[in-house]
């Protein structure tokens, strides 16, 4: 942080995805990472196919994937990756 320079504000993104066709889906996990980082869980959604992630650092590019998990706790592979450039 440099004194006197404005800092980027926190950003928010809302993500949406297609529902899994499997009959026993219990929810979805959205993972995030920054360039060069590894995916970490950012959000769990148990009702619906959208989720909002807050507190993202402005001026940073984020990468997101989602997985579905069933009532037995088995988790799917990652979805296709989407990118968000936080303003």
Image (spheres, rainbow, N blue to C red):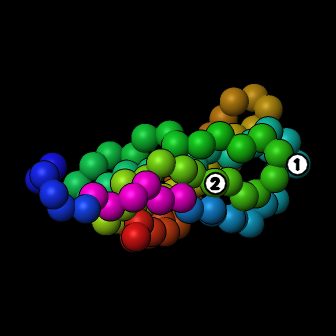
- Find out whether residue 63 is within the magenta segment: no
* Residue at the outermost front position: 4
Residue 2 visible in the displayed image:
yes
**Mark 2 nearby-residue class (10 Å; few <14, some 14–19, many ≥20):** few
Residue 43 found in image quarter: top right
Region rendered in magenta: 7-12
Q: Position of residue 79 (x, y in %)?
A: 56, 60
Instruction: Characterize the local packing of mark 1: few (<14), some (14-19) or many (20 or more) Cα atoms within 10 angstroms.
Output: few
Q: Which residue is mark 2?
A: 52
Residue sitting at 69 percent across and 65 percent down?
Answer: 17
Q: Residue furthest left?
A: 2
* Residue position marked by numbered label 1 in the rendering: 23
Percent position of residue 46, x then y: 77, 41
What kind of element bears circle 1? Answer: loop
Taking the image as drawn, is residue 60 in sight? no
Which of pointers 2 and 1 lies earlier in the amino acid sequence?
Answer: 1
Q: Main secondary structure of the magenta part?
A: loop
The percent position of residue 52, horizontal first and vertical second, equals 63, 54
Residue pictured at 13% horizontal, 52% vertical: 3
Q: CA distance from mark 2 to mark 1?
A: 25 Å
- Side of 19 where 80 appears, left or right: left
Q: Is residue 68 above or below residue 82?
A: above
């Amino acid at each position: 942080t440099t004194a006197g320079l404005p800092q980027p504000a926190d950003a928010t993104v809302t993500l949406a995805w297609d529902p899994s066709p499997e009959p026993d889906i219990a929810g979805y996990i959205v993972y995030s990472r920054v360039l060069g980082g590894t995916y970490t869980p950012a959000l769990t959604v148990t009702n619906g196919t959208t989720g909002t992630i807050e507190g993202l650092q402005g001026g940073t590019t984020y990468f997101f994937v989602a997985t579905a998990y069933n009532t037995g706790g088995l988790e799917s592979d990652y979805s296709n990756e989407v990118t968000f450039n936080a303003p």
